[in-house]
Amino acid sequence: MARLSEAEITEHLAQRPDWSLENNNEIVRTFRLANFPAAIAFVTHVAFLAEAAGHHPDIDIRYNRVRIALTTHDAGGLTEKDFALAAAIDEILG
């Protein structure tokens, strides 16, 4: 999959305002859940989405906060896969 241009990344980020660009090669969002079990349930849901997509995010869990970072390592940056998975993750919590 082709790496996105800066203009394409900006366009995609406009549609995902809760995500931010970090290091010019990954998008990141931190989710706040009710408690630790809710955070783990959320991560489990993300894991199934990621596995189905064949695209696996970096996930950091800190009690009720879950930080998700997406990038396409094979492409050396962001691709459509990252934004598609970000959209699917956003749908989990509505």
Image (tube, grey):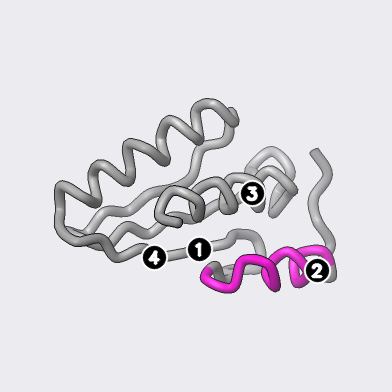
Residue stretch in magenta: 8-18
Q: Are marks 3 and 1 in contact (CB under 8 Å)?
A: no
Q: Earlier in the sequence, mark 2 or mark 1?
A: 2
Q: Which residue is mark 3?
A: 82
Tag 2: amino acid: Glu
Q: Residues within 10 Å of mark 2 (few under 14, many from 20)?
A: few
Q: Are marks 4 and 1 in contact (CB under 8 Å)?
A: yes
Q: Secondary structure at mark 1?
A: strand
Position of residue 46 measured from the top left corner of the image (x, y, whole percent)? 42, 41
Q: Residues within 10 Å of mark 4 (few under 14, many from 20)?
A: some
* Label ID, residue 69: none
- The answer to whether residue 30 is left or right of residue 89 is left
Q: Residues within 10 Å of mark 1 (few under 14, many from 20)?
A: some
Front in this rendered view, residue 17 or 60:
17
CA distance for labels 4 and 1: 7 Å
Q: Which residue is mark 4?
A: 30
CA distance for labels 3 and 2: 14 Å
Q: Which residue is mark 1?
A: 28
Position of residue 17 measured from the top left corner of the image (x, y, whole percent)? 59, 73
Identify the residue shown where x is 46% and y is 64%: 29
Q: Secondary structure at mark 2?
A: helix
